[in-house]
Amino acid sequence: MALKQGQTAPLFVKEDIFGNKIDLREYKGSKLMISFYRFSSCPFCNLRVQRIVGQHGKFEENGLKMISFWQSPKESILEHVGKEKLPFPLIPDPEKRIYRQYEVERSWLGALKVMKDPGLMADALKGGIQPSKMDGDLNQLPADFLIGPDLIIHEAYYGKHIGDHIGFHAIEQFLGLSTS
């Protein structure tokens, strides 16, 4: 059953790709976005990371911290999405323990639904993102969780297809940046 607004975020302690311990309890008092991605060479995931990095300064200025989970092993993340040091932790979870805690779904129908958004693949390819080693479930759907300073889920967004993440407008509203 999917997590919902008002629930306490499931706690975890995991190491990121650089060996830093990431303990959700240490984020108490901060606004947080936890994102779950597919595998590290996924073009849709890498496009999303590029877009997030482009907005990161604004989000960070307004108090948002971020954590990302990947179903790929550490070495693969370092080779692909982690080539450049990103401003938030990249956490490998190839056993998908945290994915299960957060009820992140898989769906072959969701994998096919991306075809309704051909611009997404074109954008990924234009950005030089080419899929390579697929070290994860091809039908893994993404998910994003906006979590308040009290570690209560403000919004749980489960992707409808393999390239679907929470919109920037929703993140801005969470941070009090948008009035509409």
Image: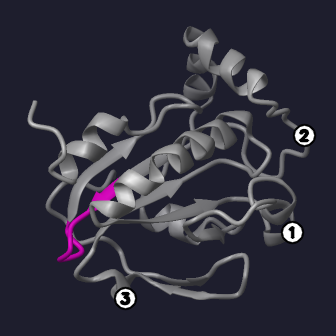
Q: Amino acid at mark 3?
A: Glu
Which residue is drawn at the image coordinates 53% and 54% (left, top)? 36
Residue 3 coordinates in the image, percent (x, y):
30, 56
Query: What separation in Å lies between label 2 and label 1 (alpha carbons)?
Result: 14 Å
Element under disc 2? loop
The numbered mark at residue 19 is none
The mark that comes first in sequence, 3 or 2, is 3
Q: Amino acid at mark 2?
A: Ser
Which residue is drawn at the image coordinates 57% and 31% (left, top)? 163
Q: Quadrant of the C terminus?
A: top left
The numbered mark at residue 75 is 1
Magenta-colored segment: predominant secondary structure: loop
Which residue appears farthest toward the left when viewing the image? Answer: 179
Residue 31 coordinates in the image, percent (x, y):
27, 67
Q: Does 144 sit above or below residue 126?
A: below
Query: What separation in Å lies between label 3 and label 2 (alpha carbons)?
Result: 35 Å
In the displayed structure image, the side of residue 148 where residue 136 appears, left or right: right
In the displayed structure image, the side of residue 35 where residue 147 appears, left or right: left
Query: What separation in Å lies between label 1 and label 3 (alpha carbons)?
Result: 26 Å
Q: Which residues are magenta?
A: 145-152
Element under disc 3? helix
Which residue is drawn at the image coordinates 79% and 67% (left, top)? 73
Residue 151 coordinates in the image, percent (x, y):
24, 74
- The residue indicated by pointer 3 is 26
- The residue indicated by pointer 2 is 132
The mark that comes first in sequence, 2 or 1, is 1
Task: Name the colour scheme.
Answer: one colour
> Label 1 crowding class (10 Å Cα cut-off): few <14, some 14-19, many 20+?
few
Q: Amino acid at mark 1?
A: Glu
* Residue contact at pointers 1 and 3, CB within 8 angstroms: no
